[in-house]
Image (tube, helix red, strand yellow):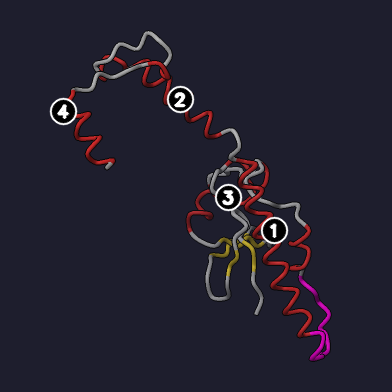
């Protein structure tokens, strides 16, 4: 069973699925779905289309240069069955998958490092622009804005805390 890669988005095409496109010079292009085929016919560059693997790889969204992917290489030479080797391989697979999960989490954490402060700044800017809708005058920094609370609301809050 041979698994092909989609020419446009690089996803896996299983046997019996996908679309083939043959050019006049006998070049064969395989696509996983009509979406990829249409984008190819529109002469779009996969590196500029956000949902493709090429875009994600180019813009640092995916882990591509990790040594754990080296183990998934295709090997053309079949190995002789050996019980000890198989046992060691299964143990190694578990360790490698654990390492990969940890590295993916670290990669995601690094990518999202400045997002929280960026979101905070955007929210602060939006509140300052639309302060009229809140009914509170925002002339001071947001951390010092005090909203008036009635005595009955204070009593209710105090009762909930107890």
* Left or right, residue 13 beside residue 129: right
* Vertical relation: 154 (above or below) 59: above
Question: Which tag, 4 or 1, sits closer to the chain's start?
Answer: 1
* Vertical relation: 103 (above or below) 138: below
Q: Is residue 83 magenta?
A: yes
Q: Secondary structure at mark 4?
A: helix
Q: Would you name the residue on which mark 2 appears?
A: 122
Give x and y (percent) for residue 40: 56, 50
* Vertical relation: 122 (above or below) 23: above
Residue at 82% across, 90% down: 82
Q: How far is disc 1 from disc 2 in space, using C-alphas?
A: 53 Å
Question: Which tag, 3 or 2, sits closer to the chain's start?
Answer: 3
Q: How far is disc 4 from disc 2 in space, using C-alphas?
A: 34 Å
Q: Would you name the residue on which mark 4 appears?
A: 152
Residue 59 versus residue 103: which sits nearer the camera?
A: 103
Marks 3, 4: nearer the viewer? 4
Q: How far is disc 3 from disc 4 in space, using C-alphas?
A: 56 Å
């Amino acid at each position: 069973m041979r698994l092909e890669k989609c020419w446009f988005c690089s996803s896996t095409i299983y046997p019996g699925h996908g679309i083939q496109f043959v050019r006049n010079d006998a070049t064969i292009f395989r696509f996983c779905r009509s979406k990829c085929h249409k984008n190819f016919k529109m002469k779009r560059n996969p590196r500029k289309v956000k949902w493709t693997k090429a875009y994600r790889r180019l813009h640092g969204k995916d882990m591509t240069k990790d040594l754990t992917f080296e183990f998934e290489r295709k090997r053309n030479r079949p190995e002789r069955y050996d019980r000890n080797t198989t046992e060691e391989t299964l143990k190694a697979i578990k360790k490698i998958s654990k390492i990969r999960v940890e590295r993916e989490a670290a990669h995601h954490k690094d990518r999202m490092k400045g997002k929280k402060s960026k979101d905070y700044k955007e929210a602060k800017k939006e509140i300052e622009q639309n302060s009229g809708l809140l009914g509170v005058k925002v002339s001071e920094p947001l951390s010092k804005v005090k909203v008036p609370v009635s005595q009955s609301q204070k009593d209710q809050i105090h009762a909930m805390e107890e």
